Amino acid sequence: MIEQLLPLTNYPLYSAAALLVVAMATITFPVLFFISAPYGRHQREGWGPTVPARWGWVLMESPAFLGFVVVFAMHQELATATGWVGASIYAAHYLYRAFIFPFRMRGGDKAKPLLTCFLGFAVNACIGPALAFGLTVLWTTPFGPWTPSAFSGLGLVLAGALVNHQSDLILHRLRQPGETTYRIPYGGFFQWVSAPNYFGEILQWLGFALFTGIPMAWIFFALTLANLLPRARSHHRWYKIEFPDYPTDRKALIPFVW
Ligand SMILES: NC(=O)c1ccc[n+]([C@@H]2O[C@H](COP(=O)([O-])OP(=O)(O)OC[C@H]3O[C@@H](n4cnc5c(N)ncnc54)[C@H](OP(=O)(O)O)[C@@H]3O)[C@@H](O)[C@H]2O)c1
């Protein structure tokens, strides 16, 4: 596993990208517990120049899709059937996140600090190509996609994507076009947690790591946790401060647990 993760001699670029993402996850996790990433409801002055949020999202997420597609296309003759399924899951998600989600957002003209966009851009420019490389050149798993862990991984990907999309749709419908108001969301997994879209996203990338079994997918999962766990806590606290009638039995991220 370590050899596949860090083949420094043969693939220094891949190894550097993987290490950078590990470093980002290690730094991000504790920092975000003290400083909420300044975008969306946590946007505030003092974080330098800003861009409209929707363009910030395009800038941030496009290398995750384009970097992945370019590197996967370069080595696609090495991809197994499992590699192709994994690639389709990842590419479909980031095609949506980079080029569809930003143009459906309600409140997408709000300011987003360029700094957050550049950090997102840099880390995604590492993750996309490194995952594609992992799914092709570094693929060593002798098994097909139907091992128990791969099978349950695929189930988690589907369940996570459903929860993520359902929750984002509920949030989307809380606003009229052009509005930026916040309201208490109800329905779907919001009956249990304040950030079900993050819960779905986390399930999805856990499933992806189980399904593909490649080290880079586990690193990506760790980074997703490092980003979304503290942010879910910030959202939950924010709701409780902003809305005195916020449901008291709702947890932050994990139904019935936390
Ligand atoms: N893989 C990762 O590491 C990662 C990291 C970040 C995000 N994501 C994914 O990207 C998507 C968006 O993330 P996000 O951080 O922007 O999620 P978010 O804070 O839940 O916001 C999602 C959208 O809904 C709006 N919204 C949220 N709460 C609302 C409320 N109470 N009333 C009205 N509108 C509300 C937001 O508007 P405002 O922007 O105006 O607040 C935004 O347009 C999610 O699906 C998330 O899982 C993934």
Image: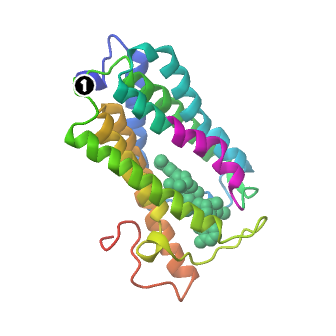
Task: Place residue 151 in its image quadrant.
Answer: top left
Tell me the residue that label 1 is attached to: 141
Dominant secondary structure (helix, strand or loop) of the stretch shown in magenta: helix
Q: Amino acid at mark 1?
A: Thr
Task: Place residue 83 in its image quadrant.
Answer: top left
In this rendering, the answer to whether 141 lies above or below 255 is above
Question: Does residue 92 show up magenta in the picture?
Answer: yes
Q: Tell me the magenta residue range.
A: 91-106
Q: Residue at x 73, y 58 (%)?
A: 110
Q: Position of residue 220 (x, y in %)?
A: 39, 40
Q: Residue at x 51, y 68 (%)?
A: 235
Task: Place residue 200 in its image quadrant.
Answer: bottom left
Q: Residue at x 61, y 40 (%)?
A: 60
Question: Does residue 24 show up magenta in the picture?
Answer: no
Q: Position of residue 192 (x, y in %)?
A: 40, 75
Q: Is residue 90 left or right of residue 134?
A: right
Q: Position of residue 67 (x, y in %)?
A: 55, 27
Q: Closest to the observer: 30 or 58? A: 58
User: The residue tagged with tag 1: helix, strand or loop?
Assistant: loop
Q: Residue at x 41, y 50 (%)?
A: 158
Q: Quadrant of the C terminus?
A: bottom left
Q: Closest to the observer: 86 or 57? A: 86
CA neighbours of label 1 inside 10 A, class few (<14), some (14 to 19), many (20+): few
Q: Closest to the observer: 6 or 91? A: 91
Q: Closest to the observer: 31 or 217? A: 217
Q: Quadrant of the N terminus?
A: top left
What's the image's color scheme?
rainbow
- Residue at far top of view: 10
Q: Is residue 36 visible?
A: no
